Image: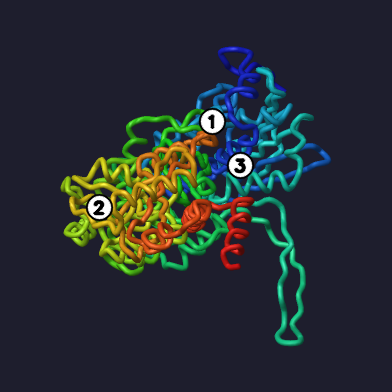
Amino acid sequence: MEKGQISVQTENIFPIIKKFLYSDQEIFLRELISNAVDATTKIKTLASKGEFKGEIGDTTIDIILDKEAKTLTIRDRGIGMSEAEVKKYLNQVAFSSAESFLKKYQDDAHIIGHFGLGFYSAFMVADQVEVDTKSYKKSAKAVKWICDGNPEYEIGKGERKERGTDIILHISDDSTEFLEKNRIQSLLDKYSKFLPIPIRFGTKTTTEWEGEGDDRKSKEVEEDNIINNTAPLWKKKASKLKEEDYQKFYKELYPMSQDPLFWIHLDIDFPFKLTGVLYFPKLNNNLEIQRNKIQLYSNQVYVTDDVKEIVPEFLLLLHGVIDSPDIPLNVSRSYLQSDSNVRKITSYITKKVADKLKQLYKKDKEGFESKWDDVGTFVKYGMISDEKFYKKADAFCLLKNTDGDMFLYDDYIEKIKANQTDKHERTVLLYANNEHDQHAYIESAKATGYDVLLMNNIIDNHFMQQMESKKDKITFVRVDSDTVDKLVQKDEEAISALSEKEEEKVKTLFVDSLGELRGGQIELRPLSTTDHPVLITRPEFMRRMKEMQQMQGMNLEDMPDSHNVVINTNHELIASKLLKMKSGDKKERFAKYLYDLARLNQNMLKGEQLNNFIKSSIEFLK
């Protein structure tokens, strides 16, 4: 048995590997299986070139767990190594065999292992590693290499009878979790689910049925537990795939999710290689739970689901897979490194998504509109956060009104500008964010001939501010921000049924009844006789500021729910009933009751206040 020392710059290389080089201990299995896939890919490449004349045979990679012996073995039937190659590749840290092989066969081989250090991740979980290997070359003999996590190693005669490599990990006492079958299965499902070479992890029991009708019987059958799909959908041509293929693959990725809305198949060769499928999920107005659902692969090897470096922020809400050998990774393959290719990929994905949305709208307007409540979140988020996407979005960004009708922006402005342009020549886009709570205001605006948009998306506050800054002479005004006569500011003034003296009496009465309003004021307006006697409005600027601060997580408990009280001087309950009451106490109670009616209409009465209002109502009925 020959002995020697691994050629490294420092004797401290192994503790560095174990503690700092890899971000997550569990990725050792990914690295070792990736190396096994490399070795298998190489033998296939050599066979296709005529440089290997023998039988390729079964190339399945086996993962063998022996809990009693405390070992985990990764066995491949790939290219194997000669003694000289073992010394070259295992004893010279950071000298990658994949690197030199790739240079020779770069047009044919799809080599995963870019890093010579991948193999050494084994020492994160093993206190001894054995490599038993036999080269594909006819004259080669089996070689065994043993190392216990120090620069010292042993090399001698191996036991393998056929080409390939066994990596045998003697699992250390502090890593016994990797001797549990379920733990290894979960890692294989995470990291190796779509590798291009079959991965076998023992056997599994399945149920088979025999016979028909009443004679039908089941029996349990043992079969190979192949954990991966070697030809995932994103590696196939879109022209060869059907809708059900995409739906089936989505369920393979996300078994518990609702069906996606639609998808985009990515396939590009220049200036970088990238394939993948991105799905638009149903969001249900909840953004956070949808994040980190895009999986990044490099030649079918799982890398990460943290893809914020290559996918624009608004598209992190998408689900699916991106696979690119050209995305630069650090030595542990766990983090992306930013460079010009990454920026090109980001631009490409943004363009593909915008083009797809435009195509879907043109091809099937009704179908697109039916999905808008979900799709709109992506589109609006994209317009807010990505300038290039914003410029393309006019072709498919829809505005939806409270009647359920949808319009492109230019079409909507054309529809409303004659009736909803104020004295400053701004087009006023009225909106509601809660049809139920703002029903009375919506109906009042519609009765006046105005159109009201529905803006109830979680990011609509940001979206409206973006539109106001980008579009020429428009403003968004919530339908309950003022009375209907003031929503679109014009010079015409309605005539009040009350004299100035009577108006002063009414205002004094309400001031005395309600006391000081926190952050608001009491106003008298000559509204329509069909409008409510008392209305509550919320100043647009103050309300927007509060909502924006709430979205940023600020504590606003001490900030008042600012609102104004508007008294309709043309309503008979004000113009006739209130002013004709004899008792001052009764007048105050009646004014307070009308105010509480307005508050009830706005869901502002809760708990004790609501109970007191009900008692007052019962007294009125008596």
Q: CA distance from mark 3 to mark 2?
A: 79 Å
The residue singled out by tag 3 in the image is 164
Q: Is residue 293 above or below residue 516?
A: below
SS type, badge 1: loop
Amino acid type, mark 2 = Val
Labelled pair 1, 3 in contact (Cβ < 8 Å): no
**Tag 1 residue:** 332
C-alpha distance separating marks 1 and 2: 60 Å
> Residue type at mark 3?
Gly
Residue 379 point in image, percent of width and height: 35, 51
| Residue 13 percent across, percent down from the top left | 61, 18
Task: Please state, as top left, top right, bottom left or bottom right, where the N terminus lies in the image.
Answer: top right
Closer to the chain start, of discs 1 and 2, is 1
> Which one is nearer the viewer's eye here, 173 or 162?
173
Tag nearer the camera, 1 or 2 = 2
Q: Is residue 222 above or below residue 272?
A: below
Q: Which residue is mark 2?
A: 488
Relative depth, front residue between 227 and 498: 498
Q: Quadrant of residue 617?
A: bottom right
- Between tags 1 and 3, which lies in front? 1
Pick out the residue farthest to the right: 68
Image height of 164 relative to 258, above or below: above
Whether residue 353 is visible to the viewer of this picture, yes or no, is no
At which x and y percent is residue 29? 63, 39
Figure label count: 3
